Image: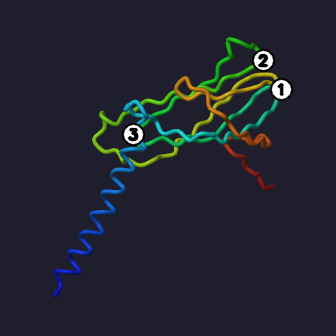
């Protein structure tokens, strides 16, 4: 009497797991079969400026939890009045024993000295991506303390 509900639950669970496994597998492959970082199409970047210093921060979403990122700003070789925010990702999936194979958000922050009206772009692994910029007031990254007297 209990074997039919058991087989129905087993079949439904197996179908759901198969669907999730095939979708994760397909999302990690590009059209030529190589692994991709699964970066979203538009990156939200928060920008603040004070006294010749720009702070850019945001997050990128990558396909699993075993990446490391390196962020830096460089002057664009084509134009002196342009900054390039370069994010380089390194995949450590095969090197680490425990990696979660689901998309993970990686935060970045970079500070650069440049004129106030400098233009900027974002590159992830050499590929330029569109950004959506939110300008905010400068805040001390170390917070501030109120000294009551």
Q: Residues within 10 Å of mark 2 (few under 14, many from 20)?
A: some
Dot 3 falls on a residue whose secondary structure is loop
Judging by the rendered image, the residue that carries numbered circle 3 is: 66
Judging by the rendered image, the residue that carries numbered circle 2 is: 81
Please provide percent x and percent y for residue 143: 69, 46
Give the alpha-carbon distance from disc 2 to disc 3, as whole Å. 35 Å
Between 113 and 92, the one lying in front of the other is: 92
Residue positioned 16% across, 80% down in the render: 3
Q: Is residue 6 left or right of residue 139?
A: left
Give the alpha-carbon distance from disc 2 to disc 1, as whole Å. 8 Å
Q: Residues within 10 Å of mark 3 (few under 14, many from 20)?
A: some
Between 83 and 140, the one lying in front of the other is: 83
Judging by the rendered image, the residue that carries numbered circle 1 is: 117
Please provide percent x and percent y for residue 85: 64, 27
Relative height, residue 28 to residue 52 (above, below)? below
Residue lying at the far bottom in this picture: please name it.
1
Dot 2 falls on a residue whose secondary structure is loop
Residue positioned 82% across, 28% down in the render: 51
Residue lying at the far front in this picture: please name it.
31
Image quadrant of residue 133?
top right
């Amino acid at each position: 009497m209990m074997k039919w509900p058991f087989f129905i639950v087993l079949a439904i669970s197996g179908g759901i797991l198969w669907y999730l496994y095939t979708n994760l597998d397909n999302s990690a492959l590009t059209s030529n079969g190589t692994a991709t970082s699964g970066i979203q199409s538009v990156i939200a970047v928060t920008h603040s400026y004070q006294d010749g210093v720009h702070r850019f921060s945001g997050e990128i979403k990558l396909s699993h939890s075993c990446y490391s990122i390196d962020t830096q700003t460089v002057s664009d070789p084509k134009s002196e009045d342009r900054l390039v925010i370069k994010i380089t990702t390194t995949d450590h999936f095969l090197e680490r024993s425990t990696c979660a194979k689901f998309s993970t958000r990686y935060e970045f922050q970079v500070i650069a000295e440049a004129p106030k009206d400098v233009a900027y772009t974002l590159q992830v692994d050499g590929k330029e991506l569109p950004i959506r910029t939110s300008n905010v007031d400068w805040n001390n990254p170390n917070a501030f303390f109120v000294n009551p007297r």
